[in-house]
Image (cartoon, rainbow, N blue to C red):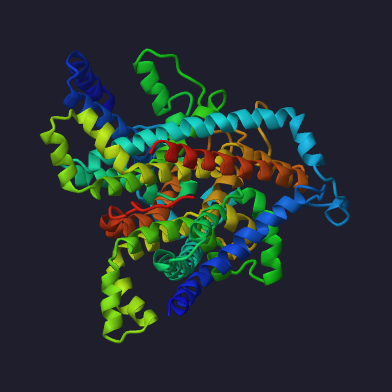
Amino acid sequence: MLGGENRVLLFCLLPALVLVIIFQFIPSVQTIWYSLTNVALLGKKALKWDFLGVGNYVRLVSDRYFWKSFSVTMRYVAVSLVFRFAIGLISALFISSKMKGRTVIALFLLLPMAIPGVMHAFVWISMIEPRAGTINRIFRWMGLPPQSWTYGRITESLIMINTWAGYVLPMLIMASALASIPKEYHEAAEIYGASAWMKYWKVIFPIIRMPLMFCMIIIVKEDMDDFTYAYMYTGEAPRADYKSELLSLYAYHKAFNYYELGYGCAVGVIIALFILVLTLAQVKAGRLAK
Amino acid sequence: MSDIGKKKNLLALVVSPTPTVLKYVVLLAILLYVFLPLAWLLLTAVDTNPGAYLKLPDGLTFGYIWGIITSKPIKSGSGQATHPIYMTNWIVNSLVLASVSMVVVVICASLASYGLSRLQMRGKGVLMTILLLAGFMPATAKILPLFRLCRQLGILNNLPGIGVVVASGSMGMMIWIMKGFFDNIPRDLEEQAWVYGYSRIRALFKVVLPAAGPGLAVIAFLSFMRAWGAFTLPLVLIRKESLFPISIGISSVLFADPGELGLSVDYGSIAALCILYAVPSVVIFYFFRKHLMSIRLTKIEVR
């Protein structure tokens, strides 16, 4: 009986598994295979390529530009993680509090998610424009020196855009998690005279630990292979100072601009490895924190 | 301007930063951060003299929005060449892509997450982790194998086919979200249905799925939005201009002659285009907003 039941349930899994295997898993394996060759996008080597083994990876280690874009990406991911998580959590606390007008605030806070990704880069032109852009006007008003957000500080601009668009999903997940906590916990904390800070630190956050961790995993995964904003502000060739060159964009440029498909795939594999390692580390840390 | 009002508020607040006041300062900062870029978009689309910075319109005009609706070509950066607009085509294409993707995600992800939620066997955690990890190769890296695969399957320039590909990309996450909803539906509900002689599948459709309605709404919404905003996959997999979804359409306008930032781009028309692009998703968003607050992820098991 149980076996038959399990068979029905496994059958339910089939359609999703088939799709994921065909369109996600097989291309990923092929990417790993290409990364071991010097296959090109166009030209002679597109048809007659050689197997290099780990040759591409050896080349990566001594590739100055790879390390440059690697450090840019690390900064991008780390800073984005902090801000997306913090703003997401703060907004979640706001919209799940008993504050007046929180439904209206929630509608406002949800707006960036309602707006398609291609538009984000365009919408932010007015903010980061160096001469009369909104951020530089605020900077001048606060007595700070204006920054060149579209050139020297493009990494920071990309982080701002990414945070703007990316805090909504963590906010939603955390707000739902907060809403799922039974009232008794809040009441109990108040009876024992816990301060607001203690209440969150000792009672609320441990309960929603899993959703918080899930948020971090999603954020890191999304940001490690972010592409659209960097692409919109860079175009088909890397910038001279590589400050907008996220790793996925570097892989794209290598494959589609320099036609070194195998090398681009090697960069892609490195990104995937990093996502894997970071995710496992987060999961481990989450378990240790139990 | 709002800056000055903010200054006065801030000054008063800095003097006496009680926790409540601090809370409102933080809230104000977040709201400004969210709203300032959008304010520019809204104002620019109706400004007779649009520019790349936030200002009150010199005069009101609906010419840009009307021009986009009637598919009038946009002046490009140099002001001479024009770029064609196929507004109706773009929107229809995007609707096809997003609807197919949504239907595929809702069917496959709800079945799979129901299975995962009720299944009791070894290796379930592994299966869950595999589903979550399957999409881990960055899209840009696997785009070329995917391009070759789609050419072999004959779904290049095929909007429903690409909708399926887009759906597969977010499947793992949707299954995880949906499983949270199923985990919160008591088993007694189905068991009662079985007692009344329902088969497993019938109980699923008649009893469990209706109870998981909000979850279905959430993944339907999220997958629609993802496909509506999809960029990288359509960029590579659609090579025919008449099949462009609106995301690629917009970028084709922006890239026709992007020019220097802050110079000579027809900001009014592009802002109008962006607003029209965002309208359907904002409308859908408005109807779905309540369900979005009900995502439950309390029982995640990562191994």
Nearest to the observer: residue B176 or residue B56: B176
Give the percent coordinates (x, y) of residue A19. Answer: 56, 67
Q: Residue at x 40, y 36 (%)?
A: A289
Q: Locate residue A63 relative to residue B154 in the image: left or right.
A: right
Note whether B126 is above or below A85 in the view shown. below
| Corner quadrant of residue B2 | top left
Q: Residue at x 17, y 30 (%)?
A: A194
Note whether A68 is above or below B154 in the view shown. above
Can residue A98 be seen here? The reply is: no
Q: Locate residue B276 relative to residue B16 in the image: left or right.
A: right
- Total marks placed: 0
Nearest to the observer: residue B44 or residue B63: B44
Note whether B199 is above or below A260 in the view shown. below
Q: Residue at x 29, y 49 (%)?
A: A176
Give the percent coordinates (x, y) of residue B143. Answer: 65, 54
Instruction: Specify the farthest residue to the left.
Output: A191
Nearest to the observer: residue A207 or residue B243: A207
| Corner quadrant of residue B95 | bottom left
Q: Residue at x 43, y 57 (%)?
A: B176
